[in-house]
Image (spheres, rainbow, N blue to C red):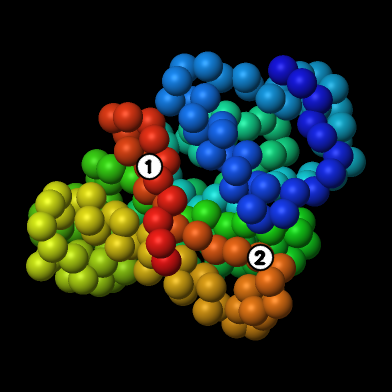
Amino acid sequence: MGLRQPQRPTADEALQTLKDGNARFVAGKLEHPNHCEESRQSLATGQEPIATILSCADSRVPPVDIFDQGLGDLFVVRVAGNVIGDHTLGSIEYAVKHLHTPLVIVMGHSKCGAITAVASGVFLEGHIASIGPAIQTAIKDVKHLEGDLITNASKALARQISKKITESEPIIADMVKNGKVIITPAYYDIDSGVVRFLEP
């Protein structure tokens, strides 16, 4: 349980840190970095997360644990189906613009309840209906593919949302164009614990 490091990583370095952390998670050899009292105290005056993670709110998908990170390491935005709206997009803008995270990961996952519900034709009532359109688009895009529909749709949704974030103006699109931030989709398999990074 070591103390956080002061240097800010590049997007590639941050990505490698997360890959290494996920490998530890899968192997059951967690280091639990930055969970010590010194880390907690060092964060009292500010934060410098190495990456922003947009993930599903599913209780089985906790990014800090999946990537074996600690306090202040990840700026995490969670919402059912890892879709975006003004609030989630604003949170990501804050992370890249003001906290200077060089990497944004949109992480879908296996056995996603939101995708399963939409694919099954379940009527979404109340405000939860707002997550439906993006998921319906992803499902439509992969219906012709072989393999598990939910898995394929989850990966397609992560790519779709990554693209929308990448093209979001004025803040994020300019930062991507200037090479200040990288947006990448990913897929987390609940059974194996493995995170696979996808091609956009």
Q: Which mark is residue 90?
A: none
Secondary structure found at label 2:
loop
Q: Residue at x 43, y 51 (%)?
A: 197
Can residue 82 be seen here? no
Left or right side of 18 for 45: right
Are the residues tagged 1 and 2 within 8 Å (C-beta)?
no
**Residue count near mark 1 (Cα–Cα under 10 Å), binned few <14, some 14–19, many ≥20:** many
State the separation of the CA atoms marked 1 and 2.
22 Å
**Closer to us: 103 or 157:** 103
Can residue 197 be seen here? yes
Depicted 122 relative to depicted 196: above or below:
below
Secondary structure found at label 1:
strand
Residue 22 location in percent, x, y?
A: 50, 33
Left or right side of 163 for 179: right
**Closer to us: 122 or 161:** 161
Q: Residue at x 27, y 51 (%)?
A: 114
Q: Residue at x 38, y 31 (%)?
A: 193
The type of residue carrying mark 2 is: Val
The tag earlier along the polypeptide, 1 or 2, is 2
**Residue count near mark 2 (Cα–Cα under 10 Å), binned few <14, some 14–19, many ≥20:** many
Q: How many marks?
A: 2
Residue 13 location in percent, x, y?
A: 67, 48
The type of residue carrying mark 1 is: Tyr
Q: Which quarter shows the N terminus?
A: top right
Depicted 10 relative to depicted 136: above or below:
above
Pointer 1: what residue?
188
Q: Which quarter shows the C terminus?
A: bottom left
Pointer 2: what residue?
181
Residue 4 location in percent, x, y?
A: 79, 31
**Closer to us: 39 or 102:** 102
